Image: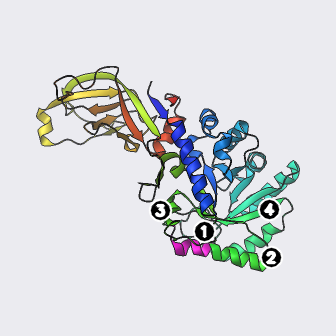
Amino acid sequence: MAKLVIQTDKIKNNIKYLSDYFDQHGIEWSLITKVFSGDKEFLEHILTEDVIEKINSVGDSRLTSLKNLKAVNPNMRTIYIKPPAAIYADDVVRYADISLNSSFTTIKALNEAAKRANKTHKVIIMVELGELREGVNREDIIAFYQKVFNMSNIEVIGIGSNLGCMYGIEPTYDKLLQLTLYKELISAKFNKNLPLISGGSSITLPMIEREMIPKDLNHFRVGEAAFFGVSPLKNEPFKELSTDTFEFHANIIELEEKKIVPEGVISDANIGHTAEFDEEDFRSTSVKAILDFGLLDVDEANIEALDESLNFVGITSDMLVVDLGTNTNPDGTDKYKIGDSIKFKPNYMAVARLLNSKFIDKEFA
């Protein structure tokens, strides 16, 4: 069975490095674990006390994942990072200490749920800054806060925004400055303290040292940089973070020399992705390897073979085919044989899918 190899120590060191880095710049942060879909085994390996001690909260976008976070550590402060559905208000209050919100109807439901649970639920209200995902429209923000401030079991602890996720709108200084100005306006009008301005993410990290974020922006929600070591805007490594934190190993289940171009009429029955052919390919053969995973597990576009000489041929629901050329080493010996594994570097989306697949093993290195 193919397996995902997780470099536990490198990930933990990344998280500790970010905690120290944010601390040096007077910024609080939430570690976002949604890529792991609440995998309890992973959470137990990574979220040890020494790792989370300097983190404001640990967040996810799935209630089942938050439930598992609380199961791993009941005292861990959790944050629900997408606007919740009102129908699940009781569960949100139960498993999330903080939630991001943009709907007054939902916050009303959270207030009632918090009353029933004899709790005060903390919220960060999201503002629309151009990404056109979650967020209260800017012209409505004052009236929105006024209504929420009057709720008995809701504590508004901040204002936030989401940029760079759906349309990829860059979190520029001007965009983030708008967020801080709204915070000042709200604080002055209602004489309320909003301790958190939450507009930072993995994309925003490189802007800190370049002094391209407003000084009042003091809360980041970070997942990709912690687990993959990169800032996704340009997919570049950030500072001293490790980027070789995951490997995907797939097994060779067939190895044969075959024609490059398929024979017969190609119908609409193909369900996978396939490579394109050149005219010279019609007369050629090469060694093909079939690997033991497919589209049900991960999309080939989200993994990169560590052996750059391999070429993608095609993928179906449960198998992937690669072209090995002549499959020979410089000394004339076979490069691969049946039973060998081929290693890939998975990206964020690949890891998320692989951890969700029941057909993929996990190994903590």
Dot placed on the residue nearer the N-terminal end, 4 or 2: 4
Residue type, mark 4 in image: Glu
Residue closer to the observer: 161 or 306: 306
Nearer the camera: disc 4 or disc 1: 4
Q: Is residue 248 above or below residue 214?
A: above
What residue is shown at x 87% (from left), y 53% (from top)? 115
The residue that appears at 47% across and 33% down in the rendered structure is: 4
**The disc labelled 1 sits on which kind of residue?**
Glu
Q: Mark 1: give few (<14), some (14-19) or many (20+) Cα within 10 Å.
A: many
SS for callout 2: loop
Q: Position of residue 199 (x, y in %)?
A: 60, 64
Q: Position of residue 144 (x, y in %)?
A: 73, 71
Q: Estimate the spatial distance between the alpha carbons at disc 4 and disc 1, rounded to whole Å.
A: 21 Å
Kind of residue indicated by mark 2: Asn
Which comes before the other along the chain, label 2 or label 3? Answer: 3
Q: Main secondary structure of the magenta part?
A: helix
Instruction: Provide the residue designation for mark 1.
Output: 128
Amino acid tagged 3: Gly
Secondary structure found at label 3: loop
Q: Which mark is residue 155?
A: 4
Mark 1 falls on what kind of element?
loop
Direction from residue 235 to residue 326 in the image, left or right: left
| Residue contact between numbered discs 2 and 1, judged by CB atoms under 8 Å | no
Crowding around mark 4 (Cα neighbors within 10 Å: few <14, some 14 to 19, many 20+) is: some
Residue 191, label in figure: 2
Q: Nearer the viewer, mark 4 or mark 3?
A: 4
In the picture as drawn, the residue positioned furthest to the top comes out as 338
- Circle 3 crowding by C-alpha within 10 Å: few under 14, some 14–19, many from 20: few
In front: mark 2 or mark 3? 2
